[in-house]
Image (cartoon, grey):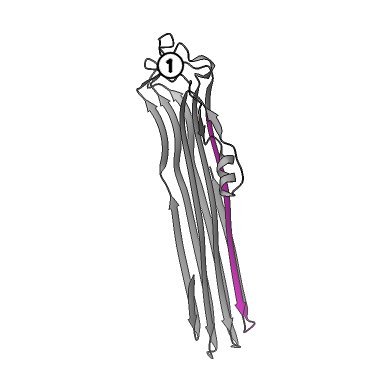
Amino acid sequence: LSLSFGGAAGAGLSIAYNEILGTTKALVENAEVTATGTAEGIAVHDSTEEARKKKEKKDYTEAKYKGLVVAADGRHELQNVMVTVAGAAGGADTFAAGAGTIVANNLAGATKANILTSNINTNINSTTTKNAGANQDVAVLATDYTKSISVGGAAGVLLGSAPTGAGIGIASDNLVRSRLVEAGIEGASKADQATVNANKLKTKAEAKADLKVNAVGVAVSGSGELAISGAGNITVAN
């Protein structure tokens, strides 16, 4: 909150820049892995719906997986409120009150789950894996959930009864979301591949964003001469 008051004139400008970056990664690379899947299984965050319901304190049953699970789960939350108020009240013939607010939010980065140039369950005929059975599964999961609430406000309040005067309030609230979410199995080259043996093989990449951007501009001119208000929002989600 920014406040500015003056006699003949009042002016206020607030600028906010918020940024969330970073990479969440789960990786198996250049490895030999045997996962028999004979245990009870493990609960895994494999859906953005699970993340949303947990934030809303609703019940959600996590899925269970057996065998090899490579899971990356990214969660991000941004809350921002910026308000600028400028006022003026005086006896001058000409006076003004102007307030401006500019908010920029940048949500970038990545969530990745990968098996790279590795051999998974390739020794299926060995003693350690002969009893693996139907639960020798492989899952590669990447989920990314973003929640952002941003409010930008500006109010220019001009009091008095001078012959000429202006109240001006301009607000702009902008958000750019550009996060990479990927899940995959690949080799370094055609000659150096990843080999995966599994009863069930699952790869899944899922992203969800709940974005709310609001801008409010208010202008009041007691002189009755001029009041100007404006508000604008720009949201870009990739």
Which residue is found at the position 44% from the left and 52% from the top?
A: 19
- Which residue does the numbered mark 1 point to in the structure image? 121
Q: Residue furthest front?
A: 40
- Residue nearest the observer in this picture, 146 or 229: 146
Q: Quadrant of residue 153?
A: bottom right
Q: Residue furthest left?
A: 30
Residue 29 left/right relative to 61:
left
Q: Residue furthest bottom?
A: 91
Taking 80 as reference, is 211 above or below it?
Answer: above
**What element does badge 1 sit on?**
loop
- Residue nearest the observer in this picture, 162 or 117: 117
Q: Position of residue 228 (x, y in %)?
A: 60, 72
Q: Position of residue 108 (x, y in %)?
A: 45, 45
Taking 127 as reference, is 146 above or below it?
Answer: below
Magenta-highlighted residues: 204-226
Q: Position of residue 200 (x, y in %)?
A: 54, 19
Which residue is found at the position 47% from the left and 41% from the top?
A: 74
Q: Main secondary structure of the magenta part?
A: strand
